[in-house]
Image: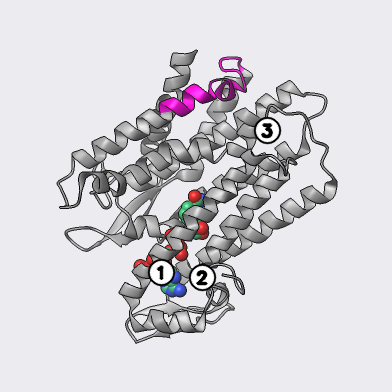
Amino acid sequence: MSLLGFFAPWLIFAGVFALHLALPARSVEGYARHDQTGAPLRYRLNGPLVLAVSLALWLVAGASGFMPWDWLWQTRWWGAAGALSLGLAGSVAVVLTASNRGRSLIGDLYLGRRFNPQVFNGRADAKMVLYLLGAVLLELNVLSFAAHHVLTYPDDVSPGVLLYVAMLTWFVCDYLVFERVHLYTYDLVAERVGFKLVWGCLSWYPYFYAVGLWAVADLANPHSPIWLHLLSALLFVGGWSLSRGSNLQKYAFKRDPQRPFLGRVPPDAISDGERHVLAGGFWALSRHVNYLGEILMACALALVLGWPLLIGPWLYPLYYVLLLGTRERDDDRRCAEKYGPLWEQYRKRVRWRIVPGVY
Ligand code: NDP
């Protein structure tokens, strides 16, 4: 069991990758550009279909008794160790097989050397595949961890656990449905493929993101008051609206800076005729209101489980605060360099970095 558990993420990743290559996909033009030619990269996107087929296979395996519903829970420590090892080995391999960029080896191992590697003649993009692998395994882990709770307490299942599964499933599906919008995000345009991305997607994402359930799936129903569930749901929907709304608005703006968002909100931009900084709608609230949305969703996921004094579920929002706090600083620097005086004007007009009125 331990050996199989260790290699389970490897096998699942191999299967998901095969599905990505084999299943039909839409081919779209991205935002990042080819290193040498400068032409926009093309991507094959089929995340929702890959997730649907993976879930169907998981259901068949569970229903047929081939794999107990909570097998990924039973083997979670081995699975996490296997994913961690694969993430480390993959990071080293992807960096050492690329030419040196003149930075320290440690820096290269962490941040990567290759920018946007694609394989099989462009059939698979490393970054998008990494995110897909992480997302599918995260969903399977969440379902399996929740199955453990249901099997342990069949007569008194915690509604918080079920709500948590619904929210995290929404989070995963939302990412996959809007895969195209993510072609316009920081990872795709600013980051290289190293430990941060490879280990992050193969190991951290599928295991740490389920830390809330990891901490409470074994515990009995805390019988939380209904208002706590309502408050969590409200926080989650509010956070999602902020995050998805702002990301969609920026995506629409990048594709056509003149077009009103959702056919209604007129574009409000700071522009020098060539470059444009979006300063209206969501982007007038704070310079990274999308990060606030993400943090609110993470808080909702911690709260809904009904163990507000337990540290485990709070590790997730804490991680978001650290990740997005640092990322906002990096991105602000990057945008200041890219947009110069336009970004300066934007900073003056929209004072807040993430939380309007506070920070
Ligand atoms: P952004 O989507 O904010 O992307 C930053 C880039 O967008 C900038 O580098 C700049 O690039 C452009 N940009 C930023 N502000 C403006 C503006 N006002 N006008 C015009 N262009 C602008 O950040 P991320 O890519 O970091 O995040 C994308 C989403 O993913 C967010 O919702 C974030 O919360 C989420 N996320 C989720 C994580 C998770 O683990 N769940 C982890 C990290 C992010 P350019 O000018 O080159 O287009």
- Between disc 1 and disc 2, whose residue precedes? 1
Q: Which image quarter holds the C terminus?
A: bottom right
- Whether tag 1 and tag 3 are in contact, CB under 8 A, the answer is no
Q: Residue at x 43, y 33 (%)?
A: 16
Residue hosting label 3: 216
Give the Cα distance between marks 2 and 3: 34 Å
Q: Position of residue 243 (x, y in %)?
A: 56, 61
Q: Is residue 335 left or right of residue 67?
A: left
Inspect the image, locate mark 3, and give the three-letter code of the amino acid beneath it: Val
Q: Nearer the viewer, residue 8 or 96?
A: 96
Residue hosting label 2: 353
Residue 217, image quadrant: top right
Inspect the image, locate mark 2, and give the three-letter code of the amino acid beneath it: Arg
* Pointer 1 local density, CA inside 10 Å: few below 14, some 14–19, many at least 20: some
Residue 32, image quadrant: bottom left
Q: Residue at x 48, y 41 (%)?
A: 205
SS class of the residue under badge 1? helix
Please, is residue 28 above or below residue 138 in the view?
below
Q: Is residue 128 magenta?
A: no
Give the Cα distance between marks 1 and 3: 37 Å
- Between disc 1 and disc 3, whose residue precedes? 3
* Pointer 2 local density, CA inside 10 Å: few below 14, some 14–19, many at least 20: many
Q: Position of residue 89 (x, y in %)?
A: 30, 31
Give the Cα distance between marks 1 and 2: 9 Å
Residues in magenta, as a range: 64-82
Residue hosting label 1: 332
